[in-house]
Image (cartoon, coloured by chain):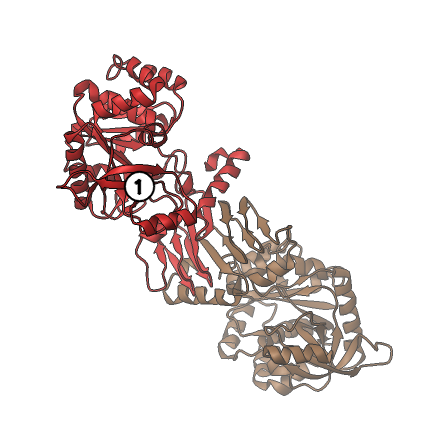
Chain colours: A brown, B red
Amino acid sequence: MHAVIMAGGKGTRFWPAGREKKPKQLLKMAGERTLLQQAVDRILPLVPRENILVVTGEAHGRDTLSQLPELPAGNIIMEPMGRNTAPCIGLASMAIGIKDPEAVMIVLPADHVVEDDEAFRDTLRLAALAAEDEPCLVTIGIPPRSPETGFGYIERGEPASAKSRNDVFRVLSFREKPDLETARSFLEKGTFFWNSGIFVWKVSSIMKSIRKYLPDLYEELLSLECSLGTPEEAGAIRAAYERILPISIDYGVMEKARDVLVVKGDFGWNDLGSWDALADLLPKDDAGNILRGPVLAVDTQNSLVLSGGKVIALVGVDDLAVVETEDAILVLKRGRSQDVKKVVDRLERENKKEYL
Amino acid sequence: MHAVIMAGGKGTRFWPAGREKKPKQLLKMAGERTLLQQAVDRILPLVPRENILVVTGEAHGRDTLSQLPELPAGNIIMEPMGRNTAPCIGLASMAIGIKDPEAVMIVLPADHVVEDDEAFRDTLRLAALAAEDEPCLVTIGIPPRSPETGFGYIERGEPASAKSRNDVFRVLSFREKPDLETARSFLEKGTFFWNSGIFVWKVSSIMKSIRKYLPDLYEELLSLECSLGTPEEAGAIRAAYERILPISIDYGVMEKARDVLVVKGDFGWNDLGSWDALADLLPKDDAGNILRGPVLAVDTQNSLVLSGGKVIALVGVDDLAVVETEDAILVLKRGRSQDVKKVVDRLERENKKEYL
């Protein structure tokens, strides 16, 4: 078994903690280890370390290497620029396919949180069995806990086989981020999962699908075959990426492919997509507060306060997120964390690179 | 004419900007000069510099001296401990009385804001004339702009004389901080002023009143007569202050005295008693915000944001005060600034002296 950890996140949604140079996956968002380290730790009982690839941006190569000393340095693949998930996955598939074209590979985002690692691995084992059985693409679907409008959804059909009746299903359709009403109807129907962005398949299956649905990308990937693992690798990838168009694996492949299965993943998944998502995840005190570092809360409720060193005193406030870092402070109304992007946009527009 | 500037404030209401070591009057709260410097600047056209005394705590002596290089160093009187306003005023009166017992002296808090300095001095000139005319105590009353419950009030009676019909009145009574209903009734009646804590009188008048209403204090002050202005001054003051009981000039003298006049002071007075008061005072942008330093406000209204150096980004918040200093950050709901004291109390209780 092989695994590919996609660690190309930009981290703007967690400004000011997440920065261009330190995106979310490189931070200790929840626990003593960074999200990237947790992603590797979580998969290590399932996949030997030499079979774990990490794909990241060149800007984060050094941090990624130093956070993962247990992996062979050659297992860190660097993208010269972000081209969304399809090129990233294609590149990793090529790298694995050179060694073993019939290998089963797991594709994982580096920046998610999982509560039950054992259940997580059980789900992946089940998905790997399904992916070995037939030349299909397997995705992990999360039973939705609320009508989220920030996620894509997967509509399931019949169980894939008699023996996996309640855990593996044929996919009827992929749905992009719905509006609230649609999301509610999905929950009512009970046949929809959140799209976790976790995939399992044989290298041969995904390469066949890329050839079929993204032939231009396939050609570029083929051109890399001889240089991967050689000193020419970086230059060859750069040349190909200059030409490759950005596209997601969902839009480019999954939504078009026929033989797609979804495995139910009930392991306390959280995509940690915003300060609100982090606040939802962390344990709270009696006043509903999450306080880290020297924080004094007077008559303050439902707030997430992360000190970066200074003492932070709050008086008479509710539903705030307050985050201090070395050079910045964010004061955010809970429920508005999608608009943190507006801060980053403004910093970009005003060319304040030091804060990005 | 002489002036006494009372600069003994503790500054806890402006935490984290105001600190034990840097109370409000030593800060640039509104403008390029500190409140103390502004207080001296404001009185200089009226009182020669050698006649301006500043009374401050020993802990603030050095800062006070360095902020006021234009004053003779001997004009800074240091109290070894705070004993409220009556001992402070008594001590200054003694110091002036040694030179000229019939001098007219103006008593001013160091930490107020005045919009119209010229009108301020005109009011004091009028008060000085009244104080010279008869052996009375003169106080400055501010026409109330709202039913403040944080101020004392002065009830006026008849005009003191025909020629000063609309500006100088006999005082009927002093009223301590009222509840809201009472404050509203004061405003409706139209015969009440806010008590500004600014006083004008002859040295002989106030000393006579202290002898009558605070005889113990008077005895202690008399004992200092020979040591003021000598090397024994500090030791003598310390010994006396150990015995002197704290009491305010309002409670100890003004409320009991008979011949008290009030002069109407219409000069844009603000006691700057809290972050809310400061926010009320400062000019606002179209969204009602007051932003100082590198601040990014996204969908944010009616907020006061003072950066101490870090970039502060706000998203979707209303009615906040956010204040960053070198080692602390305050996030305060507007209207709750009286509760900043609770933060200071907790820091004291937890013995976090470095933040006090």
- Looking at the image, which residue is at 78% across and 69% down? A125
Say which quadrant the C terminus of chain B sits in.
top left
Q: Chain letter for mark 1, please.
A: B
The residue identified by callout 1 is: B155
The one of B180 and A241 positioned closer to us in this rendering: B180
Q: Secondary structure at mark 1?
A: strand
Asked if residue B170 is positioned above or below residue A289 in the image, the reply reads above
Q: Residue furthest right?
A: A163
Name which residue type carries label 1: Glu
Asked if residue B192 is positioned above or below residue A181 in the image, the reply reads above
Question: Position of B320 compared to B197: left or right?
Answer: right
Question: Position of A340 compared to A106: left or right?
Answer: left
Q: Residue furthest left?
A: B163
> In x, y percent, where is residue B36?
27, 37
> In x, y percent, where is residue A280?
63, 60
> In x, y percent, where is residue B171?
27, 37
- Looking at the image, which residue is at 71% across and 63% down? A268
- Looking at the image, which residue is at 15% across and 30% down? B132
Say which quadrant the N terminus of chain B sits in.
top left
